[in-house]
Structures are given as C-alpha cells and as structure tokens.
Amino acid sequence: MQPPWMQQQHPAMGPWSHGYPSHPGPWGQPYSGPWVPPPEPPEHLQNQYKVKSESEARATRRANRKEAESSVDLRRSGGKKPYTLRVKAGGGIDGGCEGKNAFDEALRSLVPRILDVSVLKWKEQHPSSVEKLRSAIDNEFEYVGHKLSDGGFKDAVKRQMKTERAKMKGWFMSGKKQCPVFIEPDQWARLCEYWSSPETEQKAALMAKARQQVKNTSNVGRQGKAGKVAQLVSNPKTP
C-alpha cells in the first residue's frame, strides 16, 4: 500500500506535494500566486514616519553636539586647549581631521570681528589684526602632528573669507541691501560699492563668458578620457 503522500499526486504538484510557484518572490521564495506589492500607508502615517525620522536625526545631532561640548569642557578642566587640530607635514590643515569643523566655526566667528572683510587683498590687511586672529586661533587649538605654518593659516583664512564674501554677494545681488549682522556697516557699504562698480560688473561678465567656453576635461565617464579610449578600442577605425 502506498503511503498517503503518494496516493494522489496532482500533475501540477511537486514530488513532495508542494505546489510549484507560479511567481517567485524577490528572494526566490515561492508565492502561491502573483506577487502584489503591499499598499502604501495613509498620508498621515507617512507624515508621521517623516517627522519621526527627522526627529531622530535632530536627536543624533544633539547627542553628537553634547558629546563634543563635554569633550571640550573636559579638556578645559584639565588645563588643555579646547580643541585639537591635525596639521599636515607641509604646515596645512588636514581636511579630514576631527577638529576641522571646529576650526571652520572659529574662523566664521572670529574673522568678521577682527579682520576687515571688505579688504580683498591679504597683504592689505592690518598686520596687528592678522596677529590678533592668529593668537586667538592658537589659544583654542592644540596642533597635532605638526605646527600650523603661517602659509597654512593664511590659506585657511583667505579661503574662509572668499566663501563668506561669495555668500554676501549673492545676498546683495538678490536685491537684499540690508547689512548682515556679523560684519560692520562700513565694511558692508564698501563691499556694496565694489560690487556695483562698472569695472566689477564688466569683470564678472568676462569671467562668466570664459567659464562657458571651458571644454569638458573630465577623466571619467563616457565623455572622459577613459570612455573615449574604450570607444576607440571597441570601434577601431579602418584604414
């Protein structure tokens, strides 16, 4: 006598009486019928999930900020400088180090209060102001690896000032003439006068035209050097 599992075997059934899947699942798991995507949650639930994810991100940022503040307080209580900053062998700042964000924040706070942001050339900054800014930075940061050179310090400050001036110029060109709160009114007035001068407008137009004429010099992708070499290999020219 045949066992029950061999007595009645449907043609569409497998040898172990399991139905052959009519549609495989995304990971090869059988479904009894065609796979139907799950329905989307209602809009109010989607908004709740979005708010929850944003709240979690804010909580993470708060936790990281609190941890950083605790580390600063601990270093201060131990008689150390609040922050550490890794410096490369050439005297420049290591862009990927832990203290880089704190260094950028310090520059954003100190530069407008100490230097004249309306002065476009570094050599025209007052030497005593530059020395005061360097002293303030040195008091906040312990340099790791190497000492921050004068060239590394100058490059970092010039880069920060250029970025901030570009933001202020965007503010001005959008029609907002009110002086930002972080610079002196007389410095803002000189910057507005400079941006409004015909010479500056002509120079900006020439630079915009030059940027439009720059050809693509990418080394990656289909239009880059590697892509063009691959095209030559796959489609060799006949003599």
Image (cartoon, rainbow, N blue to C red):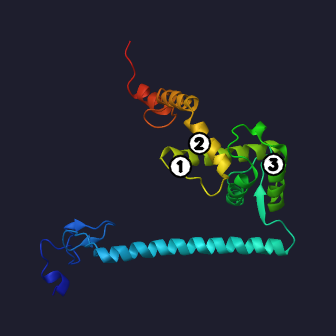
Type of the residue with mark 3: Ser
Indicate which disc residue 177 carries.
1
With 199 as the anchor, is 108 left or right in this view? Answer: right
Residue 56 in sight from this viewpoint: yes
For label 1, the SS is loop
Q: Are marks 2 and 1 in contact (CB under 8 Å)?
A: yes
* Mark 3 lies on residue: 129
* Mark 2 lies on residue: 192
Q: Disc 1 versus disc 3: distance between alpha carbons?
A: 27 Å
Work out whether 228 lies above or below 45: above
Please provide percent x and percent y for residue 30. Answer: 26, 71
Could you say which is closer to the camera, residue 42 or residue 129?
Answer: 129
Type of the residue with mark 1: Lys
> At x 40% / y 22%, what residue is drawn?
236
Between circles 1 and 3, the one closer to the viewer is: 1
With 10 as the anchor, is 203 left or right in this view? Answer: right
